[in-house]
Amino acid sequence: MPPVHVTQPLVITITKNFAISGVHRIGEFVAEELLKLKAEGRVSSVVLLTRGRSDGTLDKLASLGATIATVDWSAPATVTAALTSNHVDVVISCLPAPALHLHMALADAAKEAGVKLFLPSEWGTVSSAGKERGEGHEWFTSNQQKLHQKLRDIGLPYLLVFNGCWSDFIFNTMFGWDVPNGKVDIWGAGNGPISYTHRRDVGRFVAHVLTTLPPEQLYWKELPIEGDRKIWQGYEAKTGRKLQVTYHPLSEQEAVMRDNPNTSIPYILAWGYVSWDKGDGVLVKSDEELANKLWPEWNPTPAVDALVETYS
């Protein structure tokens, strides 16, 4: 009997119906990529859970084929009903930090509705790292870790996706970047490696793995992904525009940490500057630990190109 040649790997796809809570910042990008697959017939539905306030983002996604489901977060039964009626397989949370308290109700509703997989709102640093990354990291990720335990307790598999800094968002005045006026403030040496990933690339990666990988590669897994970790200095060479860079001593941020409680935004920002300068801005120490290899054809945007794109 001649050998059988298989041109495409046999993949068990469990995910056809998706629900996304929170469509601003990262959620919009994830939804867009899933809706592209819906247009190709590879995804059945993309449901957006919302409190009912219409805005431009929701209207745009609805025009691309998303289903808008109005829910009342104070009445979890409405969330369960939306998930059940749309036969949702996977819930993807893109809720912002101020709304993370809603995660517990969302998890219970997903379990009740028979959802197979839950993606908590992570998208940044490795939340499971714990104390080894410092007091600020431990506080910043405490809500995520409580949710992980909740999902383990109720037996609802999670998938944690970490992407470092959003390269199309991080270069703004909050973090010392006043590019329109050609000014940048840097604390410390400013040459430590940092994990950067464009939100569009995060959306592509998430949509790809959820619709191609078998359950055993998704359930209870952590996927750190990284688009780039180069430093930003290539901007001037790329654009010919000169940036006036002011370097500040790291002691300024260390003083902010001493003078503010570790649950405050000033403390967290200062902790970020200090940890980046010390080399803790990368998700993992070795490229082998990255989940990029799950999609070898992934071609994420270099950080400098994301910076150029942001201000083009």
Image (cartoon, rainbow, N blue to C red):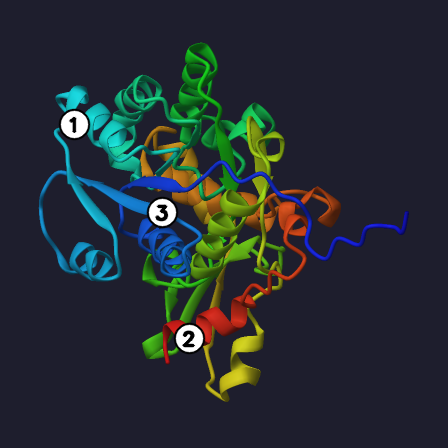
Outermost residue to the right: 1
Which residue is depicted at the point 53% across and 40% down? Answer: 13
Q: How far apart are the two marked residues, 1 and 3, measured between alpha carbons?
A: 25 Å
Task: List the residue tagged with mark 1.
Answer: 73
Residue 251 in sight:
no
- Residue 309: mark in rendering: 2
Q: Position of residue 82 (x, y in %)?
A: 21, 31
Is 143 in front, or is 279? Answer: 143
**Quadrant location of residue 237?**
bottom right
Is 308 located above or below residue 59 in the figure? below
Left or right: residue 212 versus residue 257 is: right
- What amino acid type should be assigned to the residue bearing mark 3? Ser
Secondary structure beneath disc 2?
Answer: helix
Dot 1 surroundings within 10 Å: few (below 14), some, or many (20 or more)? Answer: some
- Residue 272 at x, y = what percent? 47, 44
Q: Amino acid at mark 1?
A: Trp
**For mark 3, what is the residue?**
44
Mark nearest the camera among 2 and 3 is 3
Q: Is residue 305 left or right of residue 50?
A: right
- Distance between the alpha carbons at the discs numbered 2 and 3: 32 Å
x, y percent for residue 183: 39, 73
Q: Which is in the foreground here, disc 1 or disc 2? A: 1
Q: Residue at x 47, y 84 (%)?
A: 242
Foreground residue, 267 or 47?
47
Mark 3: few, some, or many residues within 10 Å (few <14, many ≥20)? some
Left or right of 14, for residue 277: right
